[in-house]
Image (cartoon, helix red, strand yellow):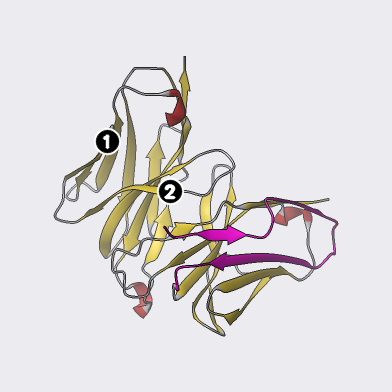
Amino acid sequence: KNQVEQSPQSLIILEGKNCTLQCNYTVSPFSNLRWYKQDTGRGPVSLTIMTFSENTKSNGRYTATLDADTKQSSLHITASQLSDSASYICVVSAANAGGTSYGKLTFGQGTILTVHP
Amino acid sequence: DVKVTQSSRYLVKRTGEKVFLECVQDMDHENMFWYRQDPGLGLRLIYFSYDVKMKEKGDIPEGYSVSREKKERFSLILESASTNQTSMYLCASSLLRDRAYEQYFGPGTRLTVT
């Protein structure tokens, strides 16, 4: 069964500090891994996407890594800001699962990040 | 910019009522999805549609139905709402030919069934 596990469940940090969120997955056949940011009361918004051959991708202060051998990904946030307070969701796509055209997505349960001033 | 809108941000319904949640996207996407999101469980796929009048069950279709009469609009129907359907409902859309499978989400509808 395809699964995505994220840790920690929640995290509290002070503004300006760095943090790293973890994602482990068992999804096959692997297509890509995406990190979404979801603000409270909003829909998720894509931050980064990585395919099998990519091991690092940056988007401003967000840097995602992927180790396809160990099936692990991390999201590193540098110099955190109050606006980084949100849920961060790891999502893994399975390639052409069941012949569908949409790519079966498996979602992690998310890490809730709170940044305090 | 892709825009996915949902008809209501908050909805309160009584047990047994028929509930309609509407979703509209403006980017001519072929694929549309309905998810529910519950604390600690992540997003779970209820139904999706890859074309007008076409639909497929997701992981948790029981108690729900859908309708797609126009390409831009995808409706989720709760035939007889129950308290265990209290949840956040998210609609999403994607391009058929996008092999990155990126889905664009609406703002969500928080449904409370009392």
Which x, y percent locates residue B36? 59, 56
Q: Residues within 10 Å of mark 2 (few under 14, many from 20)?
A: some
Reading the image, the residue beneath label 1 is A60
Image quadrant in which you'd find residue A75: top left
Which residue sits furthest left? A53
Residue B13 belongs to magenta span: yes
Quick one: B34 or B43, which is closer to the camera? B34
Of helix, strand and loop, which one carries label 2? strand
On what subunit does the disc labeled 2 rest?
Answer: A
Viewed as shown, does residue A114 lie left or right of A64? Answer: right
Mark 2 lies on residue? A45
Which residue does the image show at 30% across and 53% down from the upper left?
Answer: A33
Q: Nearer the viewer, residue B4 or A9?
A: B4
- Under tag 1, what secondary structure? loop
* Amino acid, disc 2: Val
Q: Marks 2 and 1: CB-CB under 8 Å?
A: no
Name the residue at the bottom extreme: B53
Badge 2 or badge 1: first in the primary sequence: 2
Q: Which residues are magenta?
A: B1-28
Output the chain of dot 1. Answer: A
